[in-house]
Image: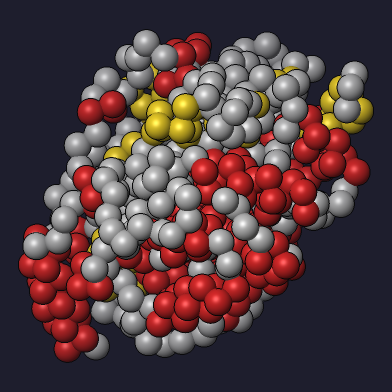
Amino acid sequence: MPLLILLFGFLSGIFRTASAQCPDYSSYAMTTHEPFSEGKYQLSYQRPIAACRKFNLSDVEVSIREMKELVKDPDLFRLFENTFPNTLDTTVTWRGFSSNDSAEELTFITTGDIVAMWLRDSANQLRSYKSLLKASDSPDSLASLYRGAINLQARYILRNPYCNAFQAPEESGLPPENNGYADTDKVTPPYSTDFVFECKYELDSISAFLQLSYDYYNKTQDSDFFGKFQWINAVKTILNTTEGLLIGTYADDGSVNESPYTFQRGSTSATETLANTGAGNPVKGGTGLVRSAFRPSDDSTIYQLFIPANMQFSSYLGKCARIMEAHDAELAQRMSDFASSVRDGIDAHGKVQHAVFGEIYAYEVDGFGSSNLMDDANVPSLLSAPILDFLDASDEMYQNTRRFALSTWNPYYMHGPVLNGTGGPHVGPGKAWPMSIITSLLTSDDDNEIVAGLRMLVSSTDRLGLIHESVDTFNASQWTRQWFSWANGLFGEMLLGLRERKRHLLEMSFQ
């Protein structure tokens, strides 16, 4: 194994040398490159040359070739060809082994245009390839990427469980990135900027670790892996952290409980900081729901009992209990019981009666009776509940909620001549996120809705052939983030799903 570590070090050196000769993808993705697709949108080719791709996986290349035979529209295929491999092509920034254990694989996956590893983003970036995942001991396998990401996320969570985005590991030799937005942050518990890129506590971030873990186990059945390194300790840390966040603002005698986490940032945007000296708006205890200071958009919650993240947490905590059964039966039972109690909390406190749509899920509640009725594009969202394996898409209350989220009753539903979809306060009104349209297609069985969504996605890339963070609903040339790997992968995942369940739609023209 020491020889293998030396080999990885040698290859990493070669990789860094090669990278220096490759174009910066942040700039590359902002311009068009031939050959253009042969449809009316003439979409750019956006894959780096083979020598500049950061991780090559033959199964991905096979999938692209297979889809070329199935997808008849040249623009739709070009969008798939660019987006599906984007995480592997551009964001697998470093791979190696732990300096403390020569058998422990590590994978550092950046979010795209920001050189940091978000727990949520990296878990979802890898999920794009779940359909290709199979058991393998090879260090050049997709399974190895998953194991390395799980191990590195475990390291991050053990040290800073309230944080959401992290620096490259020391073993990589990569310097810490400066986050200028965090210069004024006052956070408890404190953290080191050499280790943490940003420390916004989001329940969905630690839930994403559980999701990533179950995705790996579900496809490989490799339960032994989870007992080898720090996974069990990371789960214990997650349990201790989230159980501490069941606490309400007030004790039974009326005194104010000390908040386990506080965050304050000097900002002109209200969604970048928390009220009440960083503790957030008051929350009632005893609901069974876990608090979340921030949403998956990295915007602060209005009411900290954030329902979509509690859905995700309940779902994957319960599923990961099955993994834990082989290692610690008592801990597995604790996980299962906690998952059930959170689900009960959602049933008891997360539902509201809407005058138009009937009973729906609220986006956020405070336990005192207040609720925030909206949905945001970022996953976990109410729209994404079936993707989170929390419920089935046919569930009546989900369908009510879905109709609400995709209507103008949702204050963050954006519509116009370019595209229609949910957005959020992160970018603001008038900007729909293609991610929300992709999520709507992943959760739809309606051919007309899927065709309309595909048409919007193909026509709104400003000829760049990549999925942007947001697009102005009246002007496709006004968009944010040219390199958003998670959204790119989600599009590829969605189109591969249509191959299995709606193949006839891939034969249509979107010209």
Number of labels in the image equals 0
At 72% from the left and 22% from the top, the residue drawn is: 408
At 46% from the left and 86% from the top, the residue drawn is: 136
Q: Position of residue 277 (x, y in %)?
A: 45, 13
* 325 or 143, nearer to the observer: 143
At 79% from the left and 17% from the top, the residue drawn is: 369
Q: Position of residue 36 (x, y in %)?
A: 35, 57
**Left or right of residue 290, residue 297 in this image:** left
**Left or right of residue 498, residue 89 in this image:** left
Q: Position of residue 380 (x, y in %)?
A: 61, 43
Splitting the image into 4 quarters, where does residue 173 fall?
Answer: bottom left
Splitting the image into 4 quarters, where does residue 372 fall?
Answer: top right
How are the residues colored?
secondary structure
**Left or right of residue 464, residue 19 in this image:** left
Position of residue 260 relative to residue 176, above or below, is above
At 35% from the left and 54% from the top, the residue drawn is: 44
Position of residue 450 relative to residue 126, above or below, is above
* 84 or 4, nearer to the observer: 84
Q: Is residue 102 visible?
A: yes
Q: Is residue 368 visible?
A: no
Position of residue 32 relative to residue 400, above or below, is below
Quadrant, the N terminus = bottom left
**Left or right of residue 273, residue 501 in this image:** right
Q: Position of residue 313 (x, y in %)?
A: 64, 48
Splitting the image into 4 quarters, where does residue 336 fall?
Answer: bottom right
